[in-house]
Image (cartoon, rainbow, N blue to C red):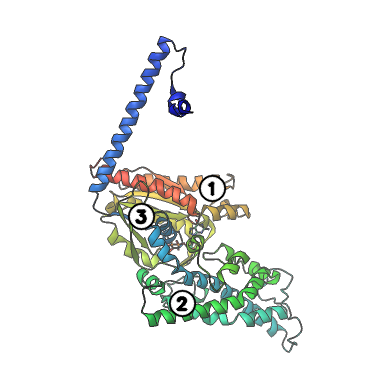
Amino acid sequence: MGLITDIDPLALALAPPADESDQQRVQRLQEEERARRVSEEIDEQLRKEGAALKKQKKPIKVLLLGQSESGKSTTLKNFQLAYAANAWAEERLAWKTVIQLNLIRHVTIILEHLSQDMNASTSEESGSDSDEPARPSRSSSASSLPLRFTEKHRLLKLRLAPLRSVQDDLQARLGASDWPAPAPGSEPRSKMQDFFVRSNAGWKSSLRPGKRSPERSRRKQDEDNETGEVLTGCAEDIKALWADDVIQDMLRRRKLRLDLLPGFFLHERDVDRIAKRDYTPSDDDVVRSRLRTLGVQEHRIHFETGPAAGTEWCLYDVGGSRTQRAAWFPYFDDCDAIIFLAPISCFDEKLAEDRRVNRLEDSYQLWKMICANKLLSKAQIILFLNKCDLLDKKLKSGVRVRDFVPSFGDRKNDLQTVAQYFAQHFKEIAKSHASALRPFRVHLTSVVDTKATALTLGIVGESILRTQLRDADLL
Ligand SMILES: Nc1nc2c(ncn2[C@@H]2O[C@H](COP(=O)(O)OP(=O)(O)OP(=O)(O)O)[C@@H](O)[C@H]2O)c(=O)[nH]1
Ligand SMILES: [Mg+2]
């Protein structure tokens, strides 16, 4: 027994073969010496990096840039989830209100369209008996067969009506009722799908437990319970509304793909969880929720794990719509790195704030402006070609890139070919408009996939850190 345990199995495995020739022995020793040198070099490198990290007192400043809905805030959430678990856990509960609001907002959008179509159908057939199936609507119909609304739709509309006032309450609680004036050429307010809050810290702390007076805590609890009650009471009707064939037909005719919109939670599996009284958001719910950013929001993250552990990062999340972009410039001066997000699934979409502008074209223009900006000549720039999951879905549903980007020509209409084609275009812009010589760093991402994004952020974080330390002569 003792004899067996005394033998180191690793040493045994590495031991030279008994019949080793002189020449083989010399070769083996040379290889061992080479391996030892490499191992020592790695140790020395790690030692230097460790020392350099300790000297790195200044936080590393990273700006998240890109058009609205490109995924900046979602990338920030991924940073928090991967590297600041404690802060993330504290914030998660605050997102519950946003998720409930996202869900309810999509129900009220459907109800608005339903009302319009039902009104149109009843005005066509005035004096109809309300117990009889309503006459089909022709007003919005793109197809020759009219929509057949029935008593079921009238009842759903009636029973889900209380959600409108719950939506108003939730928006008020988030401080989200204050809309900016729509810019010329933009969507009218009633058509805008999302909402925003003015400050990052304010809404989160007011919704987090433990940061309020007992009186406010009680009030908040009452409000939560009330929202929960109404939602629970409406759950079956919400699911029935979304599952209804006539409603789906109505949305199709109106070319409304709600399931591709941000903050979509109307699938049965989501309604079942979110409409429960004791609902607690999952990580996945939080990254899929939608809350528009206004202004520039600073987030300090003390990296707890990974190669950057021990360093402090200052991440700036900005509002991406056109009226928000002037606020970016003051942050360019001493920024260390930029993560630029371009949602490439948007090649067939227009900007919400200016319906004349294609969203991919807007991303190209923004990218050009960032690459050419002299204030950023020392900053590293990393490009995320985001929303690859949605791009894949879109291509598989039959949307052809060449119908929107004629230069794409007859190439294969699949994810890999399309992503590579767009990446090449971004690369060419970077090359011809660069304010400094820098490598082209690009990642194909779907930042709602937290596992894959954690890996990408690991690579990005390490490369930002290394370049940063090298530039500061700390390595
Ligand atoms: N399916 C999918 N959804 C995404 C992806 N990235 C972001 N989203 C969703 O898109 C919505 C918008 O993302 P945000 O991160 O809020 O966009 P933003 O760039 O911060 O937008 P602004 O604050 O308006 O500038 C959110 O609901 C996200 O969940 C992605 O890669 N795939
Ligand atoms: Mg944002």
Q: Which residue is mark 2?
A: 171
Check disc 1 and give the amino acid type: Val
Check disc 2 and give the amino acid type: Gln
User: With 422 as the anchor, is 468 left or right in this view?
Assistant: left
Give how far across and how far down residue 317 sits, in percent.
37, 61
Q: Which residue is mark 3?
A: 369
For the question of whether residue 176 can be seen, the reply is no
Query: Dots 3 and 2: beta carbons under 8 Å?
Result: no
Q: Which quarter shows the C terminus?
A: top left
Q: Which residue is mark 1?
A: 418
Q: Is 275 located above or below residue 474 in the figure?
A: below
Q: CA distance from mark 2 to mark 1?
A: 39 Å
Which of the two discs, 3 and 1, labels the residue nearer the N terminus?
3
Secondary structure of the residue carrying tag 1 is helix
Report how many numbered discs are placed on residues in the image: 3
Check disc 3 and give the amino acid type: Met
Q: Quadrant of residue 266?
A: bottom right
Q: Residues within 10 Å of mark 3 (few under 14, many from 20)?
A: some
